[in-house]
Image (spheres, rainbow, N blue to C red):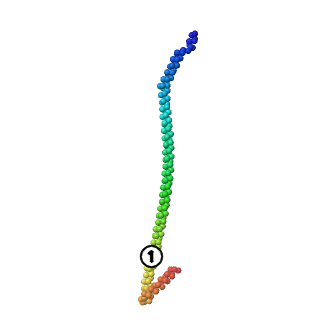
Amino acid sequence: MQNLDVISVNIWQMLASLANLVIIFLLVKKFLYKPVKKMLETRQNAIQSDYDAARDAKNQALADKDAYEEKLRSAKAEADDVIKSAVNVASQREKEIIAEAKVRADGIVRQAENDAVLERKKAEDGIKKEIVEVSSLLTEKMLGREVSAADHQNFIDSFIESIGEDDAD
C-alpha cells in the first residue's frame, strides 16, 4: 500500500492550496490588477485626449489655412482692382494732359500765325512808307517841282496796285 500513498489525494492539502490560490488571486486583484487597470485607463484617456487635441489642432490649422488663403485671394483681387483703377486714372490723366497740350500747341500756333500776320502787315506798311518817300523824292526830282498831295496819292495807289498784280502772278 505504500504505492498508493504517493498517488493518493489529500483533500486538506488541496483545500489549503486552493485557499492559498484564492487569497493570492484576491491580493493580486486588489493590489495589482485594479491599480494597473486604473493606470491603463488613465493612460488610455490621456492618449485619447492627446489624439483629440491633435485632431482639433489639425482641424483648426486647416480652417486657419483656408481663411488665410481666402484672405490672400481677396487681397490679390483687391490689389488687381487697385492696379486697374490706377491704370484707368493714369490713362484718363494721360488723355487730359495730351488734350491740354494740343490746346496749348494750337494756341501757340495761332498766336505765332497772328504774330506773323501782324509782322507782315507792319513790314508791308513800312515798305509802303519807304516806297512813298522814295517815289515822292524821285517824282520831285524827275518833274523838278513839288507834287501835290492828290497827285502823290494817285501815283502811290497805282504803284501799289502794280506791285500787288506782280505778286499775284
Please give the name of the residue rendered at 52% of the width and 17% of the height, measured from the top-left corner.
15
The location of residue 96, given as percent across then percent down, is: 47, 64
The residue furthest top is: 1
Q: Position of residue 139 (x, y in %)?
A: 44, 87
Residue that protrudes farthest toward the left in the picture? 146
- In this rendering, is residue 95 above or below 41? below
Give the image quarter of residue 142: bottom left
* Residue beneath the point at 45% across and 79% down: 124
- x, y percent for residue 65: 50, 45
Residue 59 in sight? yes
Q: Is residue 147 above or below residue 6?
A: below
Query: Regarding mark 1 in the picture, which secondary structure is present there?
Result: helix
In the rendered structure, which amino acid carries the disc numbered 1?
A: Leu
Seen in the image, is 145 located left or right of residue 70? left
Circle 1 is placed at which residue position? 118
* Along the viewing direction, whichever of 47 and 81 lies nearer the viewer: 47
- Crowdedness of circle 1 by 10 Å Cα count: few (<14), some, many (20+)? few
* Residue 3 position (above or below residue 162): above
Q: Quick check: can you spot residue 141?
A: no
Q: Nearer the viewer, residue 125 or 110?
A: 110
Total marks shown come to 1
Residue at left offset 45%, top offset 76%? 118
Q: Residue 105: horizontal and vertical position, in percent?
A: 47, 68
Q: Residue at x 49, y 43 (%)?
A: 60
Residue 118 vs residue 11, the one in the foreground = 11
Q: Quadrant of the N terminus?
A: top right
